[in-house]
Image: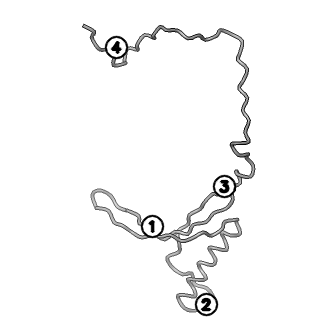
C-alpha cells in the first residue's frame, strides 16, 4: 500500500493580472490553474479545497474567527519507496557482552533523599 505525504497551501485571495484575460472569474481561474500546475511539476497531486475556521487574536483583545480556504495536495512519500514495510524487517538480538552479569535481587534500593518516601516519618 503506498504511503503519502501531504502539503496544504492557502488558496489565493485575489486573482493575478494576466495579459489577455478579462474578467474576475477568468483571472481567478488562471491564478488557480498556475498554482495547480506548479505543484504538479513538483509531483504533487491535487486532492481538494477545504474551508477551515481559524481563531486569531489574544486574550486582551478577544479572538476573531476567520474562514481560510486551503488547497490540499499529496504525493507518494519518497521514504515509502526506499524503506521496507515493518513486516519485512527482521531483527536479531545482539549477542550478550562478556562481563559481569546482572542478576535479579529481592533487595530494594535505598530511596533517594529527594523522594517523597524518604521525607516521611515512620513513627
Give residue 102's position: percent from left, percent from top: 61, 11
Residue ID for mark 4: 118
Query: What residue appears at the point 71 percent right and 69 percent down from the top-left corner?
Result: 41
Q: Secondary structure at mark 3?
A: loop
Give residue 111's position: percent from left, percent from top: 40, 13
**Camera-nearest label, 1 or 2:** 1
Residue ID for mark 1: 52
**Camera-nearest label, 3 or 2:** 3
Give residue 106's position: percent from left, percent from top: 49, 8
Query: What residue appears at the point 27 percent right and 11 percent down from the top-left corner?
Result: 121
Which is nearer the N-term, disc 4 or disc 2? 2
Which is nearer the N-term, disc 1 or disc 2? 2
Depth order, front residue of 68/57? 68
Q: Secondary structure at mark 1?
A: strand
Residue lying furthest left in this view?
123
Query: What residue appears at the point 73 percent right and 46 percent down from the top-left corner?
Result: 83
Q: Quadrant of the N terminus?
A: bottom right
Residue ID for mark 3: 3
**Camera-nearest label, 4 or 3:** 3
User: Label 4, label 2: how many angstroms apart (C-alpha)?
Assistant: 80 Å
Horizontal side, residue 67 vs residue 123: left or right = right
Residue ID for mark 2: 21
Depth order, front residue of 95/40? 95
Which is nearer the N-term, disc 1 or disc 4? 1
Amino acid at each position: 500500500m503506498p504511503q503519502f505525504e501531504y502539503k496544504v497551501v492557502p488558496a489565493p485571495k485575489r486573482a493575478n493580472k494576466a495579459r489577455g484575460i478579462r474578467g474576475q472569474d477568468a483571472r481567478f481561474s488562471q491564478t488557480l490553474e498556475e498554482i495547480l500546475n506548479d505543484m504538479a511539476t513538483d509531483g504533487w497531486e491535487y486532492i481538494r479545497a477545504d474551508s477551515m475556521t481559524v481563531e486569531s487574536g489574544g486574550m486582551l483583545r478577544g479572538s476573531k474567527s476567520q474562514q481560510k480556504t486551503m488547497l490540499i495536495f499529496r504525493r507518494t512519500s519518497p521514504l515509502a519507496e526506499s524503506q521496507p514495510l515493518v513486516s519485512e524487517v527482521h531483527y536479531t538480538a545482539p549477542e550478550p557482552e562478556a562481563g559481569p552479569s546482572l542478576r535479579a535481587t529481592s533487595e530494594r534500593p535505598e530511596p533517594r533523599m529527594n523522594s517523597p518516601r524518604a521525607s516521611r516519618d515512620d513513627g
